[in-house]
Amino acid sequence: MKKDYRIKSNKDFQLIFKNGRSFANRQFIVYLYENNSVNHFRLGLSVSKKIGNAVTRNQIKRYVRQAFLKLQNDIDAKYDYIVIARKPVRDMNYHQAKSSLIHVLKIAKAIPRNFSSNP
């Protein structure tokens, strides 16, 4: 994922946590914050040490980044997104994680309700 598409600074994370809207399912929490300063979405990831070791956490982050890359044409580009992974994600493969992420993004109305994912 390109550097412009990432959220890394603590200041940006805190701004989105404070002012953004949150949506969740059993596997993910997604915060959305409308950002008019850039014309594409930005993504921040948070995977707690409670979920597993570094290998597991990095694998989950790769799954989420890859899912967002596949969805970048369908996702609402005016928002910044923070994705927080919950414990059930550690037992999922890529396709299950992507499906769960699509589900929570539909709840957040960041992608159309009638969107169907093609693996």
Image: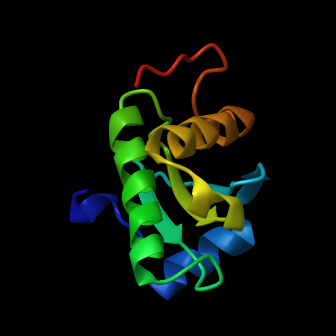
- Residue at coordinates 22% horizontally, 58% vertically from top-left? 2
The x, y position of residue 30, in whole percent, is 65, 55
* 32 displayed left or right of 43: right
Q: Is residue 73 above or below residue 83?
A: above
* 33 displayed left or right of 12: right
The x, y position of residue 64, in whole percent, is 45, 53
Please identify the quarter of the rendering in which residue 20 is found.
bottom right
Q: Is residue 4 above or below residue 93?
A: below
Number of marks in the rendered image? 0
Residue 5, can we see it? yes
- Residue at coordinates 48% horizontally, 43% vertically from top-left? 78
Using the image as rendered, state which of residue 96 and residue 103 is in the foreground: 96
The x, y position of residue 15, in whole percent, is 61, 75
Residue 37, can we see it? no
- Residue at coordinates 52% horizontally, 85% vertically from top-left? 11
- Residue at coordinates 69% horizontally, 54% vertically from top-left? 27
If the image is split into quadrants, where does the N terminus sit?
bottom left
The x, y position of residue 55, in whole percent, is 39, 76
* 8 displayed left or right of 3: right
Using the image as rendered, state which of residue 78 and residue 112 is in the foreground: 112
* Colour convention: rainbow
Direction front: furthest residue: 91
If the image is split into quadrants, where does the C terminus sit?
top left
Direction top: furthest residue: 114
Using the image as rendered, state which of residue 61 and residue 111 is in the foreground: 61
* 2 displayed left or right of 14: left
Q: Is residue 95 above or below residue 26?
A: above
